[in-house]
């Protein structure tokens, strides 16, 4: 047997999930740990899990990260000029 202390907010989320799924908190934690261990054994990183989705839906605007402040100012100006 193992005892683990969790932050109250995490415990509340687990309780809500258990209620929604009509299962026990212990079962949710067992399933989560099992998935985590399997993922680590397989050597899959979060990047590897989602790499086929990255860049899939491209923006037509090329340099958004460089021009984001300018874009925000333009959008605010448009919003408040009406």
Image (cartoon, grey):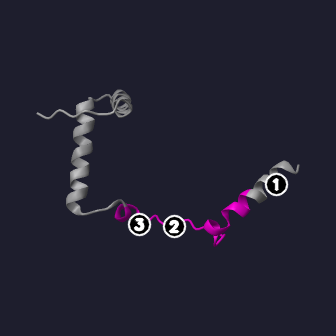
Asked whether the beta carbons under mark 1 and mark 2 sit within 8 Å of each other, the answer is no
Q: Is residue 33 left or right of residue 55?
A: left
Q: Position of residue 52 (x, y in %)?
A: 42, 67
Mark 3 and mark 2 lie on one chain; the one further toward the N terminus is 3
Q: Closer to the camera, 77 or 57?
A: 77
Q: Position of residue 38 (x, y in %)?
A: 21, 54
Tell me the quarter of the picture where residue 68 sits.
Answer: bottom right
Q: Residue furthest right?
A: 82
Q: In which quadrant is the N terminus drawn?
A: top left
Tell me the quarter of the picture where residue 59 sits.
Answer: bottom right
Q: Identify the residue at horizontal 72%, vertical 57% (top origin).
A: 72
* Number of numbered discs: 3
Q: Is residue 65 left or right of residue 10?
A: right
Q: Residue furthest left?
A: 1
**Alpha carbons under labels 3 and 1: distance apart:** 37 Å
Query: Within 10 angstroms of label 2, few (less than 14), some, or many (20 or more) residues?
Result: few
Q: Position of residue 62 (x, y in %)?
A: 64, 73
Q: Identify the residue at horizontal 72%, vertical 61% (top origin).
A: 71
Q: Position of residue 29 (x, y in %)?
A: 25, 38
Which label is found at residue 21? none
Which label is found at residue 56? 2
Which label is found at residue 51? 3
Where is 71 relative to 22, above or below? below
Where is 56 relative to 17, above or below? below
Q: Magenta residues, as a range?
A: 47-72
Asked whether the beta carbons under mark 3 and mark 1 sit within 8 Å of each other, the answer is no
Which label is found at residue 77? 1
Q: Identify the residue at horizontal 17%, vertical 32% (top origin).
A: 3
Q: Residue furthest bottom?
A: 62
Where is 59 relative to 17, above or below? below
């Amino acid at each position: 047997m193992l005892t683990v202390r969790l932050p109250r907010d995490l415990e509340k989320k687990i309780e809500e999930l258990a209620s929604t799924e009509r299962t026990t908190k212990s079962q949710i934690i067992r399933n989560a740990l099992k998935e985590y261990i399997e993922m680590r054994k397989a050597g899959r990183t979060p990047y590897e899990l989602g790499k086929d989705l990255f860049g899939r839906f491209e923006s037509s605007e090329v340099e958004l990260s460089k021009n984001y402040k300018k874009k925000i100012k333009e959008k605010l100006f448009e919003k408040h000029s009406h």
